[in-house]
């Protein structure tokens, strides 16, 4: 794990908030399948889009996560924001794929992709392990090295 290279920025985010974001992504995905709700898939897709591609301070989920972190008086632990933006982009791609598969009645395929996303989010939520850094190190960075 020491050899992982993550994207770097000068911006910082609270790790507690990112872990709550992961928890809410897990809950939203699970609820979307249980309720058979494409609206929840689109909501999660939009939330990932806001976090990944806009300069807005909060997405709906990150707003609730920030509020919850403050309400529970959890200690602030600032971490680099760039890996979380990369992870949000992966989340956006995966939720777009999940929603598309689900809309085309490829439910098993959408569940497989959702399970992978839930695994990634669970690692973030439970252990603060960023799979986005692993993907960046082994699948993206080799194409940018000169």
Image: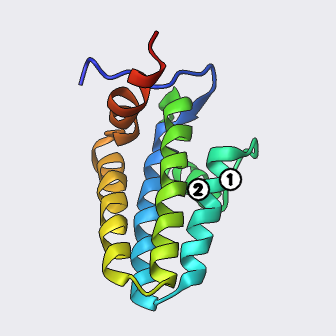
Camera-nearest residue between 106 and 78? 106
Q: Is residue 99 left or right of residue 142?
A: right
Whole-percent x, y for residue 72 in the image = 49, 53
Q: Residue furthest bottom?
A: 35
* Quadrant of the rendered image containing residue 113: bottom left
Question: Which residue lies at the image location 43% right of the left edge and 55% below the top edge?
Answer: 22
* Cα–Cα gap, marks 2 and 1: 5 Å
Question: Which residue lies at the image location 52% right of the left edge and 86% below the top edge?
Answer: 37
Q: Is residue 137 left or right of residue 99?
A: left
Q: Is residue 145 above or below residue 25?
A: above
Camera-nearest residue between 131 and 23? 131
Camera-nearest residue between 8 and 141? 141
Element type at marker 2? helix
Whole-percent x, y for residue 54 in the image = 73, 45
Question: Which residue lies at the image location 61% right of the left edge and 71% below the top edge?
Answer: 43
Q: Are marks 2 and 1 in contact (CB under 8 Å)?
A: yes
Residue 36, label in figure: none
* Quadrant of the rendered image containing residue 134: top left
Q: Is residue 46 above or below residue 8?
A: below
Count neighbours of disc 1 (C-alpha within 10 A) and say few if under 14, some if 14 to 19, many if 20 or more.
many
Q: Is residue 106 above or below residue 138?
A: below
Q: Is residue 53 left or right of residue 45?
A: right
Residue 50, label in figure: 1
Whole-percent x, y for residue 39 in the image = 60, 81
Question: Which residue lies at the image location 30% right of the left edge and 66% below the top edge?
Answer: 115
- The residue to which callout 2 is attached is 48
Whole-percent x, y for residue 13 in the image = 57, 34
């Amino acid at each position: 794990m020491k050899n992982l290279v993550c994207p770097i920025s000068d911006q910082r985010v609270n790790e507690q908030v990112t872990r709550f974001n992961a928890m809410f992504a897990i809950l939203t995905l699970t609820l979307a399948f249980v309720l058979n709700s494409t609206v929840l898939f689109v909501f999660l897709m939009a939330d990932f889009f806001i976090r990944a591609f806009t300069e807005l301070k909060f997405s709906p989920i990150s707003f609730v996560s920030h509020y919850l972190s403050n309400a529970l008086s959890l200690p602030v632990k600032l971490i680099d924001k760039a890996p979380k933006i990369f992870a949000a982009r992966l989340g956006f791609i995966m939720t777009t794929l999940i929603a598309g598969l689900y809309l085309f009645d490829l439910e098993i395929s959408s569940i497989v992709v959702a399970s992978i996303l839930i695994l990634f989010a669970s690692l973030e939520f439970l252990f603060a392990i960023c799979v986005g850094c692993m993907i960046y190190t082994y699948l993206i960075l080799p194409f940018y090295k000169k």
